[in-house]
Image (spheres, rainbow, N blue to C red):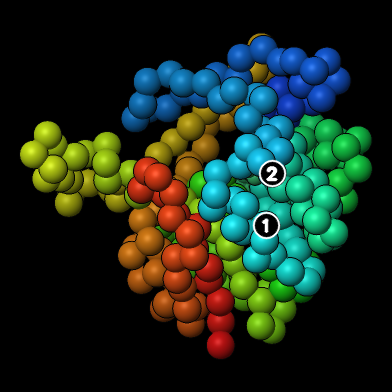
């Protein structure tokens, strides 16, 4: 499992977030992938307010309670929205500039990799939002993810994580799917980002359909259910232990 932190020289998303916070605008945050065409993340979206969030994210914020951990918090949009409804959270991110930006915004934030065992704590709600399963990277990391979550979850706690089923990318006109079953799982992708001259390293990012997620985590004693569904193969899942 990768337990590294980013350095400022390789933190394009953090640089974009920090720029936007400082100047009220940012340049293009470019996204490359070996599987997809070049794309862009609108930096304003990383600063979305509660009313502009997809419904699954709003539901997650409503359900969050107790000691809340916001994993891969980015600009801190979810932690800020939680604060507005009187809920406290701790935000963590591997991006130094995102953490700096969150602290400036008044979010309790810490630079930490969720997979690093030096980061400890007991949380009643662990939020992983905006395709939060991405952080798991690959399906083969599911066991490490489950064990790590067991360390961080307080008794009775839960994980609220969103993702999408990328199956639609392989859908034929007649509605059937052309999946190569011998290939890697279709939700395993790689991304690389660039902001101005700052280019990050390529990283693995996992999109996972609910059935696959459920099958993996159940092997580690987690129950799972879909608590909200989006418009486009996306969902919010709740995972919990007995
Ligand atoms: N949750 C935010 C940002 C999503 S982007 C939002 O919804 O707007 C994903 C974030 O996860 C990035 O800021 C990235 O730096 C962070 N991240 C990636 N891997 C991580 C890890 N292992 N531990 C903690 N944060 C991680």
In the picture, the quarter occupied by the C terminus is bottom right
Are discs 1 and 2 less than 8 Å apart at CB?
A: yes
**Depth order, front residue of 43/186:** 43
**Residue at x-position 44% and y-position 36%:** 190
Compared to residue 63, the image places residue 107 above or below, namely above
**Residue at x-position 59% and y-position 58%:** 59
Decide if residue 114 is on the left or right side of residue 83. left
Considering every residue shown, the one lying at the far left of the view is 174
The x, y position of residue 164, in whole percent, is 41, 48
Q: CA distance from mark 1 to mark 2?
A: 9 Å
Q: Dot 1: within a 10 Å radius of its alpha carbon, few (fewer than 14), some, or many (20 or more) residues?
A: many
- The residue at which mark 1 appears reads as 61
Q: Dot 2: within a 10 Å radius of its alpha carbon, few (fewer than 14), some, or many (20 or more) residues?
A: some
- Residue 89 falls in image quadrant: bottom right
The x, y position of residue 32, in whole percent, is 47, 23
- Residue 48 falls in image quadrant: top right
Compared to residue 20, the image places residue 127 above or below, namely below
The x, y position of residue 211, in whole percent, is 33, 65
């Amino acid at each position: 499992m990768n337990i590294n932190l980013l350095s400022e020289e390789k933190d394009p998303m953090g640089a974009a977030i920090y720029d936007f916070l400082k100047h009220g605008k940012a340049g293009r945050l470019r996204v490359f992938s070996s599987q997809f065409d070049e794309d862009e993340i609108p930096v304003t979206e990383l600063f979305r307010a509660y009313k502009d969030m997809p419904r699954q994210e709003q539901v997650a914020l409503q359900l969050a309670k107790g000691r809340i951990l916001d994993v891969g918090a980015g600009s801190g949009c979810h932690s800020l929205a939680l604060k507005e409804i009187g809920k406290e959270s701790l935000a963590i991110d591997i991006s130094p500039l995102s953490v700096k930006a969150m602290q400036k915004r008044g979010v309790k934030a810490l630079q930490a990799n969720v997979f690093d065992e030096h980061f400890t704590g007991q949380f009643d709600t662990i939020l992983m939002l905006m395709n939060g399963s991405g952080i798991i990277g690959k399906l083969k990391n599911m066991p490490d993810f489950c064990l790590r979550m067991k360390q961080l979850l307080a008794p009775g706690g839960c994980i609220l994580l969103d993702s999408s089923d990328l199956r639609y990318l392989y859908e034929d006109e007649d509605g059937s799917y052309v999946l190569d079953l011998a290939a890697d799982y279709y939700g395993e992708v790689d991304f690389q980002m660039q902001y101005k001259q700052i280019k990050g390293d390529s990283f693995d990012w996992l999109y996972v359909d609910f059935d696959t997620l459920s099958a993996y985590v159940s092997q580690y004693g987690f129950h799972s259910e879909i608590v909200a569904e989006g418009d486009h193969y996306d969902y919010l899942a709740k995972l919990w232990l007995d």
